[in-house]
Amino acid sequence: MTTVPRPGGRRIVLWRHGRTEWNADERFQGQTDVPLDGTGREQARTAARLLTGLRPSVIVSSDLVRARDTAAALAELTGVPVDTDPGLRETFAGSWQGLTGAEIAAVDAESWEAWVAGVPDARPGGGETRWEVAERTSEALQKALARVEPGGTLVAVTHGGAARTALAMLLALPPELWGCLGGLSNCCWSVLHEDPRRGPDAWRLEEHNAGSLPQPVLSEEG
């Protein structure tokens, strides 16, 4: 895939945090402040070594510890300080937080089915809808982007669900198509490039759920 910058265009890297014990147990973390486990810390160090190649100019992170500690691995290598923004937190999932999918389905099957189907206004455990998450993550990204010079790179360290809704909003996808985007694996990332030729706030998805350095596309037609 390509990540060759467009002239003057900025780049956004949406980076999911490393693994936690709750990830390994497939529990809905939401905004519960669960730390990285040993695997997650190693994932963060490995990914950070790769992401230095994208020369981040601004790093912003969710204020939850699993994201902050992931971001710290990149800051240590690049010298770029990490700013935190609670707008990049994961979806607040109310009574579902800490439960597995099977446990949620056993007590709230209809809502769980709507959530899994990607319904934008489904409210997990009485918490936030995907639309509400998309609005606050987009606001956080716009604040951070205001500090990125043309041609610069913003690395935003966030969470799986938050990253997917932010991605959908940046790409201006209609809500009924949000479910077409796959999730991010722990410590993988998506890369978007600003494309000024298409107008203001126009973004192009260059990498999704990547875990290696981007490679330029030499020809899209061949």
Image: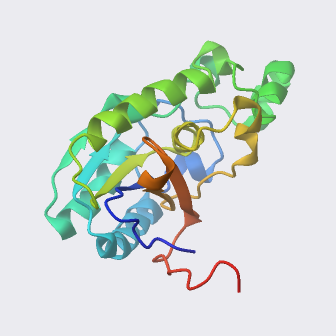
Q: For residue 151, which quarter of the picture? A: bottom left
Q: Position of residue 103 (x, y in %)?
A: 76, 30
Query: Total of numbered circles in the picture?
Result: 0
Side (left or right) of 220 relative to 47:
right
Q: Which residue is pictured at 37% across the width and 49% down the height?
A: 156
Q: Height in image: 53 above or below 182?
A: below
Q: Nearer the viewer, residue 22 or 142?
A: 142
Q: Quadrant of the C terminus?
A: bottom right
Q: Is residue 31 visible?
A: yes
Q: For residue 125, which quarter of the picture? A: top right
Q: Position of residue 171 (x, y in %)?
A: 57, 44
Q: Position of residue 186 (x, y in %)?
A: 53, 58
Q: Which residue is pictured at 81% across the width and 26% down the height?
A: 114
Q: Which residue is pictured at 75% across the width and 33% down the height?
A: 118
Q: For residue 91, which quarter of the picture? A: top right
Side (left or right) of 74 relative to 202:
left
Q: Position of residue 175 (x, y in %)?
A: 70, 30
Q: Which residue is pictured at 20% across the width and 44% down the height?
A: 147
Q: Nearer the viewer, residue 212 or 174?
A: 174
Q: Nearer the viewer, residue 106 or 202?
A: 202
Q: Quadrant of the N terminus?
A: bottom right
